[in-house]
Image: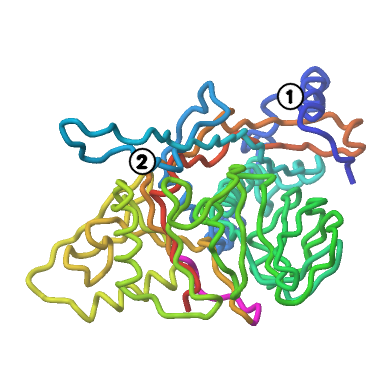
């Protein structure tokens, strides 16, 4: 197996390989060896390809912007008190009280996906019955997997109930962990026995296997009923991380979210926290009242919801709720565009859902899920978002690097790497909302 190398070394090896290629630049062109491409491979390969879930709705919907000359911004977390009041003609002036500002510091993250194709496979697959240009096919597959991976990171879950663990691990729902925890993340946990957050020595993730997350040493052992929550991501911050507050609960216990390095994110604090709706780890059915409350919470803060994101389960639940109120006064195909995505074709009256109260509803299979008091994964969360304050900031656009340095790889293999640098930024956290603990 090739040795692990840094991004800088990989690029350096690629440059070295430019002048020592075994094959010419046209070698990988289809039909170079004078044989036709395989109909079998193209037909069945396409069927296998289409069977994979590669929808990346959330990533496509949010706006992409250049990073800009900034490493952060300031949130106003307190209006001040007593600074405005009526005064009489000879009355004293209002008490001076300044606003409270809190810095938010965000640096770009690097994410990458790589692949390798042996040179023998490159040659053999150009023969009749092969897949054709295997390097191009694998590059296309990796491109789609890369974007899918980015989408999953942006929708990863931020907290889960633990069923046990130790000083170097915590155990939670395996499906949830696979979709929400990544190598290099830092996870803390809330000790329900001591009623305290355990983060003295951090918790850098080095392995995720079947729901067991291995971390660097905690100062005390994780026990059944404790809550693990993300402190910082090695990859992109997720919308679930942003829609957290100090008062949120997971599985009935407290969870604290410190992504963006906010010292306090108490629920309902002005401009400091998103609106979070929980039910202490007990599953509940989605209702229109819950959605309306989330919309109301954003509008009270001065925002205007532009997008609702949820899993397919909650999409169908919402559709059933609206079907019961359907009035047949005419049919009209209706779709709304959000970023590069469009809602499902439906009617303005909501029989086949495309919007709710004029807000586009986009289902995404990667939407984060909650866990209940028994460490069982519940349904997906519903996010109501004001996307005016939500953006994917790109510090370095997606790059592709090809490496043919066989000596560095210690193998006759052509390697490819796709990487980008950026981060999900939210300039007003209070204009976002989440509904969790749903069946």
- Give the numbered dot on residue 172: none
Q: Which residues are magenta?
A: 374-381
Task: Please tell me whether residue 64 is drawn above or below residue 18 in the rendered image.
Answer: below
The kind of secondary structure element at disc 1 is: loop
For the residue pair 198 and 292, the one nearer the viewer reads as 198
Q: Which residue is mark 1?
A: 24
Residue 271 figure quarter? top left
The percent position of residue 434, horizontal first and vertical second, equals: 44, 61
**Which residue appears at 68% of the width and 40% of the height?**
112
Report the mark closest to the observer, 1 or 2: 2
The percent position of residue 187, horizontal first and vertical second, equals: 72, 55
Residue 80 figure quarter? top left
Q: Is residue 432 found left or right of 172 in the rendered image?
A: left
Q: CA distance from mark 1 to mark 2?
A: 49 Å
Would you say residue 376 sits in the magenta stretch? yes
Q: Earlier in the sequence, mark 1 or mark 2?
A: 1
Q: Which residue is mark 2?
A: 388
**Which residue appears at 65% of the width and 45% of the height?**
235
The percent position of residue 126, horizontal first and vertical second, equals: 69, 44
**Which residue appears at 36% of the width and 58% of the height?**
308
Question: Is there any visible trace of residue 6 in the rendered image?
Answer: yes
Q: Is residue 54 found left or right of 404 in the rendered image?
A: left
Would you say residue 398 sits in the magenta stretch? no
Crowd band around label 2 with a 10 angstrom C-alpha radius: few (<14), some (14–19), many (20+): some
The percent position of residue 156, horizontal first and vertical second, equals: 58, 57
Task: Please tell me whether residue 346 is drawn above or below residue 91 in the rendered image.
Answer: below
Residue most extreme to the top? 19
Q: Is residue 256 found left or right of 207 in the rendered image?
A: left
The kind of secondary structure element at disc 2 is: helix
**Which residue appears at 38% of the width and 49% of the height?**
431
Question: Is there any visible trace of residue 37 in the rendered image?
Answer: no
């Amino acid at each position: 197996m090739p040795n692990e190398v840094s991004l800088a070394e990989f690029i350096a090896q690629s440059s070295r390989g430019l002048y020592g290629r075994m094959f010419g630049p046209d070698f990988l062109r289809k039909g170079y060896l004078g044989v036709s491409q395989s109909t079998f491979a193209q037909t069945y390969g396409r069927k296998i390809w289409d069977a994979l879930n590669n929808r990346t709705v959330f990533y496509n919907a949010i706006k992409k912007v250049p990073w800009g000359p900034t490493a952060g911004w300031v949130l106003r977390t307190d209006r001040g008190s007593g600074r405005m009041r009526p005064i009489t003609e000879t009355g004293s002036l209002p008490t001076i009280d300044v606003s409270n500002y809190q810095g938010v510091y965000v640096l770009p993250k690097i994410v990458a996906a790589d692949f390798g194709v042996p040179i023998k496979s490159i040659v053999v697959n150009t023969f009749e019955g092969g897949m054709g240009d295997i390097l191009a096919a694998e590059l296309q597959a990796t491109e789609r997997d890369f974007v899918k991976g980015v989408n999953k990171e942006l929708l990863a879950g931020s907290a889960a109930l633990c069923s046990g663990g130790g000083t170097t691990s915590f155990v939670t729902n395996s499906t949830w962990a696979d979709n929400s925890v990544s190598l290099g993340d830092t996870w803390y946990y809330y000790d329900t026995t001591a009623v305290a957050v355990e983060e003295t020595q951090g918790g850098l993730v080095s392995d995720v296997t079947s729901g067991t997350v291995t971390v660097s040493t905690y100062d005390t052992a994780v026990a059944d009923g404790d809550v693990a929550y993300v402190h910082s991501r090695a990859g992109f911050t997720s919308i679930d991380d942003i829609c957290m507050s100090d008062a949120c609960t997971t599985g009935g216990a407290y969870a604290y979210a410190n992504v963006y390095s906010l010292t306090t994110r108490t629920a309902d604090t002005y401009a400091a926290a998103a609106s979070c709706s929980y039910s202490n780890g007990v599953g509940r059915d989605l209702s229109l009242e819950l959605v309306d409350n989330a919309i109301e919470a954003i509008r009270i803060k001065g925002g205007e919801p532009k997008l609702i994101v949820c899993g397919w389960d909650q999409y169908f639940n919402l559709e059933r709720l609206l079907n019961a109120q359907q009035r047949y006064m005419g049919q009209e195909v209706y779709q709304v565009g959000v970023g590069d995505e469009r809602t499902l074709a439906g009617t303005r009256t909501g029989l086949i859902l495309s919007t709710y109260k004029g807000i586009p509803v986009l289902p995404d299979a990667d939407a984060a899920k909650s866990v209940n008091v028994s460490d069982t994964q519940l349904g997906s969360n519903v996010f109501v978002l004001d996307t005016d304050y939500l953006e994917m900031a790109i510090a370095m656009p997606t790059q592709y690097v090809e490496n043919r340095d066989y000596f560095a790889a210690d193998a006759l293999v052509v390697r490819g790497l796709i990487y980008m640098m950026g981060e999900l930024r939210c300039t007003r956290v209070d204009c976002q909302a989440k509904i969790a603990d749903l069946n």
